Amino acid sequence: MTAHEFRPRALAAHERLIPFDPDVIAREFGERPPDDRPVPAAAPSTRRLYRLSELADLKGAAEDAVIAGGIMTRGAKLLIHAASGAGKTTLMDHLTASLASGRPFLGRFRVDRPRRVLVIQAELAESELASHGHALLATFEGTPAADNLVFWLETQLRLPRCYPELRAVAREVGAEIIAIDPFLEFFEGESSDKPEQVGKVFAALDQLMRDEPAIEGVIVAHHSNVQSQRTAGSWKFEGWPSTILRIEKVPGVPTDRMLCFEKIRAPGFGLPEKLQIRLSDAGYLPIVDEEPARTAGELTVVMVLREAGGQLRRQELVERVQKRAGVKLRAAVGYVGKAKQAGQIIDFAAGREVIYRVSETAP
């Protein structure tokens, strides 16, 4: 495996990056810039206000999932943590390869489409990275992941100071998902116990998603504390992520891990507290991989779409499902979301409208 150096192409006038001042984030934490430069004008407000009634017309988390089950929605932030040597990097490999290939995560949680994923790795030597790559290719060779999954070996990237470089490489690669492993190598402080030091890195990652709308999510790997029951350091690690996955070793079974769903911010998914997974030639897969039963609500959604000729606008679909099933709006929206997660229906944009249609795999 040879290293590939990304050289940002010359940008057209309308593409040029807005100058970034790393002290902007520092000032948010009450820090004084290193000289007497004037404080730049405040950025335009990103405030978004919604009436409760307006939320009914927006996609819910189940409909807007990148990874089903509430594990990752668009704009979400996912944290993986484990004790040293428990397999954070290996699980991160398979998670990012699933996103890059479009294959289900752990063979169970649907990924809606292949994405370009940039993994910034700060711990592995090139030969170690090659070994990880060889293991992944045994499962993902011949899938879109072979081109979509890009690794950047970088040991000097510090945030927010190196934000312009991170943004430039993300653009050059065309990244839609950013993953960093491990977190400690990317922040400027000396201890992850300091909320202000940790917060600046998270703020820089949030800024990246605002500046680059093509980036749909961020994944971060971090270490657990001594007891392995929570992340090491600041409470920011619990507050910032949308999803937290903890990895535990299974005593006496070297190939097995217990994946704990420590936090799923989006409500209503009913995930188990823990899922035992095993590393094999096919990657990490659950010990018991049962096909989830199709519910009456999901079948109602498919039936309504077929009666309408195969496709409907989102709002009309929800209204018809609500009427057919005799349920409240929330339940109808949930039925549509579950049908999409199960791959029975798919959506696409037509201007400002979202159109749903029956998938080829629907019963």
Image (spheres, rainbow, N blue to C red):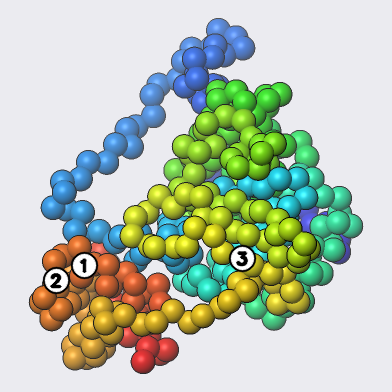
Residue sitting at x 51%, y 55%:
261
- Kindly give the residue lying farthest to the front in the view shown: 252
Question: Element at badge 2?
Answer: loop
Mark 2 = which residue? 327
Q: Is residue 26 visible?
A: yes
* Label disc, if present, on residue 180 of the rendered structure: none
Mark 3 = which residue? 276
Question: Element at badge 3?
Answer: strand
Mark 1 = which residue? 331
Question: Element at badge 1?
Answer: helix
Q: Are marks 1 and 3 in contact (CB under 8 Å)?
A: no
- Nearer the camera: disc 3 or disc 2: 3
**Image x and y of residue 334, in percent:** 27, 67
**On the image, which quarter does residue 104 sit in?**
bottom right
Q: Amino acid at mark 3?
A: Gln
**Image x and y of residue 277, in percent:** 64, 67
Structural distance between the alpha carbons of marks 2 and 1? 6 Å
Q: Are marks 2 and 1 in contact (CB under 8 Å)?
A: yes
